[in-house]
Image (tube, helix red, strand yellow):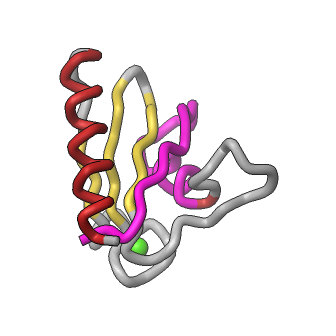
Amino acid sequence: MPTALFNAGIFSNSTLNAAAIAAYADANPNVAGNQTLGTNQAIIFGWNNGTYLSVNDNLAPFNANSDLLVNVTFSTIALIIFYSLLIYCSQLLT
Ligand SMILES: [Ca+2]
């Protein structure tokens, strides 16, 4: 289970893989500098008008073959419910 969840913002990279790598490199755009996504942490980011959820495995860099990456693009209401559930689940882990 992820130990933390970050919203990395929206990326305009040419590929989803490149966007995921960029999101992993700076998981928290609200803090100056780069906050690399840690192992076993989760991230939400936007790319190409979609919203994606990725969960890092126990190796820090993004690897499309081993890290979870799912398209979670829903309606706004569904996203609010989804985010609320993720926050609730992450609080259960602490
Ligand atoms: Ca990884």
> In the figure, 77 relative to 85: above or below?
above
Is residue 61 or residue 15 the one in the foreground? Answer: 61
Is residue 45 or residue 2 the one in the foreground? Answer: 2
* Residue 8 screen position, x and y as percent: 54, 44
Identity of the residue drawn at 21% across and 23% down: 74
> In the figure, 34 relative to 78: above or below?
below
Identity of the residue drawn at 28% across and 72% down: 66
* Residue 79 screen position, x and y as percent: 26, 27
Q: Is residue 8 magenta?
A: yes
| Left or right, residue 84 beside residue 25 | left
Residue sticking out furthest to the right: 32
* Residue 59 screen position, x and y as percent: 43, 82
| Left or right, residue 22 beside residue 73 | right
Q: Is residue 12 magenta?
A: yes
> In the figure, 15 relative to 26: above or below?
above
Identity of the residue drawn at 44% across and 77% down: 39
**Ligand 1 image-quadrant field:** bottom left
**How many numbered callouts?**
0
Identity of the residue drawn at 44% across and 33% down: 46
Q: Which residues are magenta?
A: 1-24
* Residue 45 screen position, x and y as percent: 45, 40
| Left or right, residue 91 beside residue 46 | left
Q: Which quadrant would the C terminus be assigned to in this image? A: bottom left
Is residue 73 or residue 66 the one in the foreground? Answer: 73
Q: Looking at the rendering, which quadrant does residue 34 occupy? A: bottom right
Q: Looking at the rendering, which quadrant does residue 1 occupy? A: bottom left
